[in-house]
Amino acid sequence: MRVEGEPRSRRDRPAKPALTRAGIVAAAVEIMRAEGLPKVTVRRLATDLDTGPASLYVYFRNTAELHAAILDELLGTIPPPAAGGDWRDRLERMLTDYTVMLFEHPSLARSALVTRPHGGHYLDLVEAMLALLDEGGVPPGQTAWGLDLLLQFGTATAAEQGTRQESLDADDQWDALLDTVQSTSAATHPHVAELAGQLVAGAPEQRLSWGFRALINGILATPVPTS
Amino acid sequence: MRVEGEPRSRRDRPAKPALTRAGIVAAAVEIMRAEGLPKVTVRRLATDLDTGPASLYVYFRNTAELHAAILDELLGTIPPPAAGGDWRDRLERMLTDYTVMLFEHPSLARSALVTRPHGGHYLDLVEAMLALLDEGGVPPGQTAWGLDLLLQFGTATAAEQGTRQESLDADDQWDALLDTVQSTSAATHPHVAELAGQLVAGAPEQRLSWGFRALINGILATPVPTS
DNA sequence: ACCTGAACACCGTTCAAGT
DNA sequence: ACCTGAACACCGTTCAAGT
């Protein structure tokens, strides 16, 4: 029995669960959902898991690997494409789901741009996208290279817009760009001045959708070099 | 006269130049060229400028703003497009120059994805690109939105490939992806298995060039929604 | 207005020592 | 093999006090 005021002994603290890769990832996802990826540091994670930072290096070689594992976890939440309908629409839906998911976690998008995902859920996503491109009759070489183009666009857009959303600073940068564009002299930068309105026009969803469609059209229209 | 072994007095040390925005950026670029952007920290920069870190906050609100200033400096080194010839070729040349420049400084590419550039040299680059798209008869709406697509692709590619090049870790990630793709079972992921070779094929320059051409084709083929 | 030392509140990673 | 405390070598940013 515990005596009031006496520190709990190791014995009657809630049993400290053994460390496992899956357990660490789960704890990391929890912190990320509650406080964002930047709070998922090795030190913070170790504190939550009631251990020292060095212990985590038994399971992850570095922070990048930990982030990759978190990403693959989230990729598992993307629904597979619906069965019928236009392949383009279904492809765009899947890419939008992917992008929106990353949009909530811009720092994860940033890390995905740098560290290539390669987990099981990523493989499933790629398989589904390749199947849709194949269904659309896109030649194999264009399918293979186009896949990267599509995912990269989604990832980069999430990194860009998502960050802008989460940081006040980035808002200021946006305003600064607007100022720059709108105060551009027609004498020195005639094209910028003329297109000023359109450069910043359009809702983000519209631009995202247009981007995916432009990419699909471009992939279809552009043969890869015959090695 | 200095006495041997005696520390120099403030008086006969080389005159400490007054801090200016331009001087700080110049020092930052110097560190970056010699040791890479990750070494360009507020503290390191302050040390090189013989002052304390707090002093730099008089000129830059934060590190992101400092990075943006460095990027604009480098953008000034991109040659303007040649006068004659096919507008597509000249556009691709300019985008390739942009991407190759960022390729040498992947962390700058990463920061450009997140913090929108808005300096004078950036504006010049945008003006030149818009002029080429206009010359090619691309409708204004498609030009405005397509510009982002093209620059984003270059930036993201530089961030991705450049980082892979600079870090040993990223090499391992690449190998891991290769392993994953090549050992993929045809039973569970038939499309990945079938395209395995092509997914990872092609020299980076070929893929970059194909990407730019596919983007240009897609931009030309895809009207923007009429508001 | 510009500049600064010192402090605040953190980081990732490695190492030697334990079990 | 797994786990750990402590150390190493750093970070960005703010604040109160100067000039």
Image (cartoon, coloured by chain):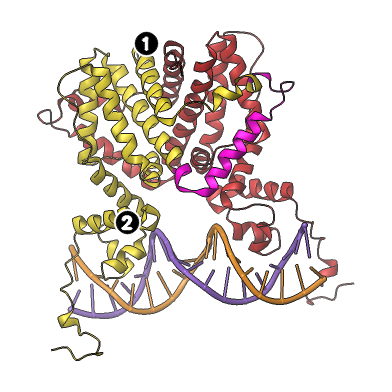
Chain colours: A red, B yellow, C orange, D purple
Q: Chain of mark 2?
A: B
Q: Chain of mark 1?
A: B
Secondary element at tag 1: helix
Task: Indicate the amino acid at tag 2.
Answer: Ala
Closer to the camera, A63 or A99?
A63
Q: Residue at x 27, y 38 (%)?
A: A177
Q: Quadrant of the C terminus of chain B?
A: top left
Q: Is residue B137 left or right of residue B181?
A: left
Eyeballing the image, is A133 above or below A55? above
Eyeballing the image, is B89 above or below B137? below
Q: Residue at x 41, y 17 (%)?
A: A214
Q: Which residue is mark 2?
A: B34
Eyeballing the image, is D7 above or below B170? below
Q: Quadrant of residue A191?
A: top left
Few, some or many C-alpha atoms within 10 Å of disc 1 (few <14, some 14-19, many ≥20)? some
The magenta span reads B163-191
- Asked if the residue at tag 2 contacts the one at tag 1, i.e. Cβ–Cβ closer than 8 Å, the answer is no
Q: Is residue A80 left or right of residue C11?
A: right
Q: Is residue B52 left or right of residue C16?
A: left
Quick check: can you spot residue A76?
Answer: no
Magenta stretch holds residue B176: yes
Q: Quadrant of residue A185?
A: top left
Secondary element at tag 2: helix
**Percent of width and height locating residue A125:** 62, 26
Quick check: can you spot residue B167?
Answer: yes
**Percent of width and height locating residue A157:** 44, 32
Q: Quadrant of residue B91?
A: top left
Closer to the camera, A19 or D18?
A19
Magenta stretch holds residue A139: no
Q: Which residue is mark 1?
A: B221
Q: Residue at x 57, y 26 (%)?
A: A97
